[in-house]
Image: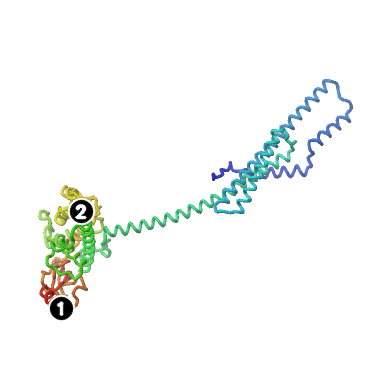
């Protein structure tokens, strides 16, 4: 139903003046028009016979003028009644609208009766006008009609004020709902950002100084690097499954002849593969960039620590966009081309566009490359920090078939072959590190030898 649009704001001062006039007229006892006419006739009779014809013409002219004034006053009163009735109808219609939302059956019935009543009154006024049965008017009638019109306008604005208040509450409710949706969207965005940047900020290293370095700082960065690496491997395996790769065959091509305790343990083979590529050259200051110039040995600690400080607080995408030809940018491109085989990329995306972009010195705008770049950043930071120590950090891994040692190793699968006492290293998943006398264990996958497995099968 269309909303009622009220007229201009009613003049409250005018309404008060109208009330005052009505009270003064009633208190003064204004006589009706008929009484005024009779009083004039009596005065004329007392004054004697009518004057000559000339004076009589003037008298008739004066009476005609009075009659016109009375008709004009009557028409003004009629129009005042008409506008008052229209205003009352508008107020009743507004009341009918406001009673519908929220639904008020009693309010609707009352407003409907008011609308019908005002329509009937307008119809009566129309008939009076057509039949020229306009009642003679008085000043009081005119003022009362104006007062009724002002009252109706006030009522209309009161009703519309309530309607606007209701709409305001509805809008406030919508705003609250939208804020909740926005907060939920922000939460989802943070979750997505964590997937692309799983390691998050390097908390606890904000006020790090070169003179205050200790093994705990290296361990913090290492944990972030491993977390980022595992996230990339997970994404890579998902891409392989989507592309139709046979996961068992792919795992066997990385580490052949391995007995896995559970099928899901094959993912450790892919972590092993990515670690080998990403940490290759870690002990060399150039780190896969043989032609990159380095400062003298005395200045290297500060040089690598400055590299670490520059990159650790920046987003990798932002850093690469501002410094595409930096040493880290070159490292990122070199590791991508080494880790992601052309056949792998073609099976993932259907073409070699990402490889072409990287070869030309750019960085693809894809989730896969973003995850890789984040991992590369964490490994790069770890290597920069390792050369900031004195003595420098060294990396190590355990060869296949070695016996398990709790001093240098940590099993990536605690539930694998727990019943066996003679577990051997199948392969190193995450390399270990030495910082002076501090040893950070490497993470290995353990499995029994084939002789042990065959012996178990034969005993059954």
* Label 1 with label 2: CB-CB less than 8 Å: no
Q: Can residue 401 be seen by looking at this rendering? A: yes
In the image, is 364 to the left or to the right of 104? left
Q: Quadrant of residue 440?
A: bottom left
Q: Name the residue under label 2.
A: 348
Label 2: how many residues lie within 10 Å, few (<14), some (14-19) or many (20+)? many
Q: Can residue 444 be seen by looking at this rendering? A: no
Q: Which of 5 and 146 is in front in this view?
A: 5
Residue under the point 19% across and 76% down:
418
**Percent coordinates x, y for residue 144 in the rendering:** 70, 42
Please, what secondary structure does the residue beneath circle 1 have? loop
Q: Nearer the viewer, residue 108 or 184?
A: 108
Chain-order first, disc 1 or disc 2: 2
Numbered disc in front, either 1 or 2: 1
Q: How far apart are marks 1 and 2 (CA)?
A: 44 Å
**Percent coordinates x, y for residue 214 in the rendering:** 20, 68
Please, what secondary structure does the residue beneath circle 2 have? helix
Relative to 220, is 131 above or below?
above
Q: Which of 381 and 276 is in front in this view?
A: 276
Q: Name the residue under label 1.
A: 460
**Percent coordinates x, y for residue 256 in the rendering:** 12, 65
Label 1: how many residues lie within 10 Å, few (<14), some (14-19) or many (20+)? few
């Amino acid at each position: 139903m269309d909303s009622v649009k009220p007229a201009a704001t009613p003049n409250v001062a005018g309404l008060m003046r109208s009330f005052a006039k009505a009270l003064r007229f009633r208190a003064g006892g204004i006589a009706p028009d008929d009484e005024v006419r009779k009083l004039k006739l009596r005065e004329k009779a007392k004054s004697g016979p009518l004057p000559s014809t000339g004076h009589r013409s003037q008298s008739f002219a004066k009476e005609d003028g009075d009659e016109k004034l009375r008709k004009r006053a009557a028409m003004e009163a009629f129009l005042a009644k008409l506008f008052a009735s229209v205003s009352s109808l508008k107020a009743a219609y507004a009341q009918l609208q406001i009673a519908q939302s929220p639904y008020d059956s009693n309010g609707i019935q009352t407003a409907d009766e008011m609308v019908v009543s005002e329509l009937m009154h307008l119809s009566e006024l129309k008939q009076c006008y057509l039949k020229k049965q306009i009642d003679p008017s008085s000043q009081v009638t005119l003022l009362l009609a104006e007062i009724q019109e002002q009252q109706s306008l006030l009522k209309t604005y009161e009703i519309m004020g309530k309607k606007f208040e209701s709409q305001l509450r509805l809008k406030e409710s919508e705003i609250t709902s939208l804020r909740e949706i926005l907060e939920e969207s922000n939460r989802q965005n943070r979750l997505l950002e964590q997937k692309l940047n799983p390691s998050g900020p390097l908390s606890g290293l904000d006020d790090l100084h070169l003179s205050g370095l200790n093994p705990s700082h290296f361990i913090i960065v290492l944990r972030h690097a491993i977390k980022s690496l595992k996230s990339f491997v997970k994404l890579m395996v998902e891409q392989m499954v989507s592309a139709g790769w046979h996961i068992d065959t792919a795992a066997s091509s990385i580490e052949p002849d391995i007995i896995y305790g559970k099928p899901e343990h094959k993912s450790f083979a892919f972590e092993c593969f990515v670690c080998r590529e990403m940490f290759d050259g870690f002990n060399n200051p150039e780190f896969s960039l043989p032609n990159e110039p380095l400062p003298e040995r005395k200045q290297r600690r500060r040089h690598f620590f400055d590299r670490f400080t520059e990159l650790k607080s920046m987003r990798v995408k932002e850093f690469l966009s501002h410094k595409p030809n930096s040493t880290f940018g070159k490292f990122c491109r070199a590791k991508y081309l080494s880790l992601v085989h052309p056949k792998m990329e073609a099976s993932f995306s259907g073409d070699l566009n990402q490889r072409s972009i990287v070869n030309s010195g750019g960085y693809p705008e894809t989730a896969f490359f973003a995850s890789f770049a984040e991992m590369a950043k964490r490994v790069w930071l770890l290597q920069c920090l390792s050369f900031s120590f004195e003595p420098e950090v060294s990396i190590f891994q355990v060869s296949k078939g070695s016996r398990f040692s709790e001093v240098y190793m940590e099993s990536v699968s605690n539930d694998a072959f727990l019943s066996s006492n003679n577990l051997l290293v199948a392969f190193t998943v995450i390399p270990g590190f030495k910082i002076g006398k501090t040893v950070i264990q490497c993470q290995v996958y353990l499995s029994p030898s084939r002789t042990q497995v065959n012996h178990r099968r034969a005993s059954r």
